[in-house]
């Protein structure tokens, strides 16, 4: 009697098990990296002055954001309070302008947040021979006016046009796992530091550390030692080996990611602990 192996079921179970193992090993690091990116680029991470009495922060939704993908603006008083503020937020892209009217009362140092419902998700639209086009390219605040607590109305000149750098598209590293887009810039930078270390291994000092100037000047090992050390460094700086070193260090629990996106010995006292 011949028994057929249900390879479809075997493949499904194996894939399910692998995804569970992958999430258990990587989720915490992915979350740490994404939170670091959010803290630098999210709403409230940077404030722009708006006249003498107010300041604002803008976050424009991107295609990598989780649902709902919403653009927002936050407003707050620099000090004291403002009775009323009114303006028009205008975004431009693809030859179209999108406007949202904003009215806020009793503005104080506590941020007031508004959804920019008319702004599209900022994403790459198409690439041609002579240009790259995004759904949004610029934004600015127009027709701004503020009413102070004494009833005095002050017009505010239109803000400078802010040009979007599209950093997330050009420079950031993203990965989709578990139905979520994760920013892995921290992981990328940490692996770059490992690669730099090995690239310089054997070039300076007896230990191979990147220390161009030590006590008494630069120190150099014997030529044959340096050749051997540089050969080791070249091998260890191969990309897939760098990736293996990074994840083995994280999984071992002996190293953590510090505030500068470098691997740090867990028991080494950090300046400000932000490791995982």
Image (cartoon, rainbow, N blue to C red):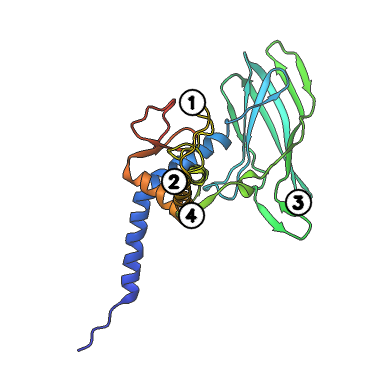
User: Is 7 positioned to the left or the right of 237 in the image?
Assistant: left
Res. 94 mark: 3
- Res. 119 image quadrant: top right
Q: Nearer the viewer, residue 35 or 75?
A: 35
Q: Which mark is in front, 1 or 2?
A: 2
Label 2 Cα neighbours within 10 Å, binned few <14 / some 14-19 / many ≥20: some
Task: Say which residue label 1 marks.
Answer: 215
Circle 2 sits on which residue? Answer: 225
Q: Which residue is mark 4?
A: 238
Q: CA distance from mark 1 to mark 2?
A: 21 Å
Element under disc 1: loop
Q: Residue at x 71, y 58 (%)?
A: 127
* Above or below, comparing residue 116 to residue 234 in the picture: above
Indicate the secondary structure of the residue bearing disc 4.
Answer: loop
Which is nearer the N-term, disc 3 or disc 4?
Answer: 3
Mark 3 nearby-residue class (10 Å; few <14, some 14–19, many ≥20):
few
Q: Earlier in the sequence, mark 1 or mark 2?
A: 1
Residue 146, percent from left and from top: 72, 21
Of 58 and 263, which appears nearest the observer? 263
Q: How many marks?
A: 4
Q: Quadrant of the N terminus?
A: bottom left
Badge 1 crowding class, 10 Å Cα cut-off, few under 14, some 14 to 19, many 20 or more, is few
* 76 with respect to 185 (left or right): right
Q: Report if the CB atoms under discs 3 and 1 are less than 8 Å apart.
A: no
Give the distance between the C-alpha atoms of the residues marked 3 and 1, in whole angstroms: 59 Å
């Amino acid at each position: 009697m011949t028994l057929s192996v249900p390879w479809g079921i075997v493949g499904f179970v194996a894939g399910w098990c692998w995804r569970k193992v992958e999430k258990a090993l990587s989720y915490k690091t992915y979350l740490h990296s994404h939170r670091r990116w959010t803290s630098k680029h999210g709403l409230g991470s940077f404030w722009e002055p708006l006249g003498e009495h107010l300041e604002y922060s803008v976050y424009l939704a991107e295609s990598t954001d989780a649902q709902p993908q919403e653009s927002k603006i936050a407003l707050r008083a620099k000090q004291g309070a403002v009775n009323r503020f009114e303006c028009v937020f205008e975004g431009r892209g693809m030859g179209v302008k999108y406007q949202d009217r904003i009215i806020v009362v009793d503005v104080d140092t506590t941020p007031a947040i508004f959804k920019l419902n008319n702004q599209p998700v900022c994403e790459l639209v198409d690439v041609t021979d002579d240009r790259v086009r995004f759904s949004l390219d610029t934004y600015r605040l127009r027709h701004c006016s503020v009413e102070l607590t004494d009833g005095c109305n002050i017009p505010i000149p239109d803000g400078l046009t802010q040009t979007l750098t599209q950093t997330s598209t050009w420079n950031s590293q993203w990965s989709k796992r578990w139905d979520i887009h994760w920013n892995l810039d921290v992981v990328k930078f940490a692996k770059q530091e490992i690669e730099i270390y090995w690239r310089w291994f054997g070039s300076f000092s007896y230990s191979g550390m990147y220390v161009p100037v030590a006590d008494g000047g630069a120190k150099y090992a014997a030529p044959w030692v340096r050749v051997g050390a540089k050969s080791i460094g070249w091998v260890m700086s191969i990309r897939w080996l760098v990736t293996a070193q990074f994840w083995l260090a994280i999984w071992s629990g002996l190293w953590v990611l510090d505030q500068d996106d470098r691997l740090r010995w867990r028991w080494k006292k950090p300046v400000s602990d932000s490791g995982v």
